[in-house]
Image (cartoon, grey):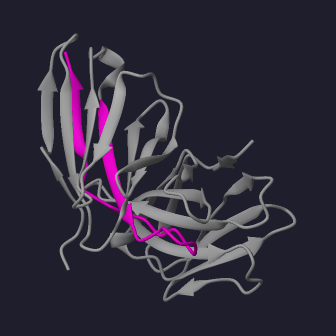
Amino acid sequence: KAGVTQTPRYLIKTRGQQVTLSCSPISGHRSVSWYQQTPGQGLQFLFEYFSETQRNKGNFPGRFSGRQFSNSRSEMNVSTLELGDSALYLCASSLAGTGGINEQFFGPGTRLTVL
Amino acid sequence: AQTVTQSQPEMSVQEAETVTLSCTYDTSESNYYLFWYKQPPSRQMILVIRQEAYKQQNATENRFSVNFQKAAKSFSLKISDSQLGDTAMYFCALGYNQGGKLIFGQGTELSVKP
């Protein structure tokens, strides 16, 4: 089974621009979560989508948004980029839906640099 | 509040020796799960071991085992017979049923030296 894939792997943007990152979960997984990883703040939860609905949300401004498609693929969008948005963005998928252990499988990440 | 704390930012161990990484957590929920993830220099997060809070028996996976002390809210990871490939950042994480949110600790950078 193919793992979680994320595209693109690297991105360079300038302040004020917007960016869209993509995540394809493991086949059969319906939950997709997004995390931001920075040296200062560590790993922080952004949001989770399950069956095309946002199920959980972290403490990030409204500039960060996401969506999930019927095939479970997910995208996250960051508008009006700031220097502090430079980070590794990780996507994780899981079977989680009807209960039970929420074991998440991570993608390789997208490294976003904002200049 | 839901928090995970790893008090050891860096650790070093000689190859073939044993090392223990510490983690404490705080949650008001009674049903939860705990995980240790490994992030090598490639940045790919890999699940090392998991523990269901309702299980008293400590989880083991080959050279990796945990010491789960529920009352103390402690969840340490023991790595036996350390190998060079164990060099990585290790994250302790807290999760719940039905929800894709994991709360991570700040991580412990482990170096295994030959």
Q: How many marks on residues? A: 0
Would residue B82 appear left or right of B67 to someone viewing this image?
left
Q: Quadrant of the N terminus of chain B?
A: top right
Q: Residue furthest right?
A: B71
Q: Position of residue A3 (x, y in %)?
A: 23, 69
Would residue A102 appear left or right of B26 to someone viewing this image?
left
Q: Nearer the viewer, residue B95 or A47?
A: A47
Q: Residue at x 47, y 80 (%)?
A: B16
Would residue A7 appear left or right of A3 to someone viewing this image?
left
Q: Position of residue A79 (x, y in %)?
A: 27, 20
Would residue B17 appear left or right of A32 to someone viewing this image?
right
Taking the magenta stretch, the answer to whether it contains residue B67 is no
Q: Which residues are magenta?
A: A87-115
Q: Residue at x 36, y 21 (%)?
A: A63
Q: Position of residue A99 (x, y in %)?
A: 57, 72
Q: Residue at x 46, y 76 (%)?
A: B82
Looking at the picture, does residue A55 appear above or below residue A71?
Answer: above
Q: Position of residue B66 (x, y in %)?
A: 64, 76
Q: Nearer the viewer, residue B11 or B100?
A: B100
Looking at the picture, does residue A88 appear above or below residue B8?
Answer: above
Q: Nearer the viewer, residue B26 or B111?
A: B26
Q: Residue at x 58, y 86 (%)?
A: B60
Q: Quadrant of residue A50?
A: bottom left
Q: Nearer the viewer, residue A1 or B6?
A: A1
Q: Quadrant of residue B52?
A: bottom right
Q: Quadrant of the C terminus of chain B?
A: bottom left
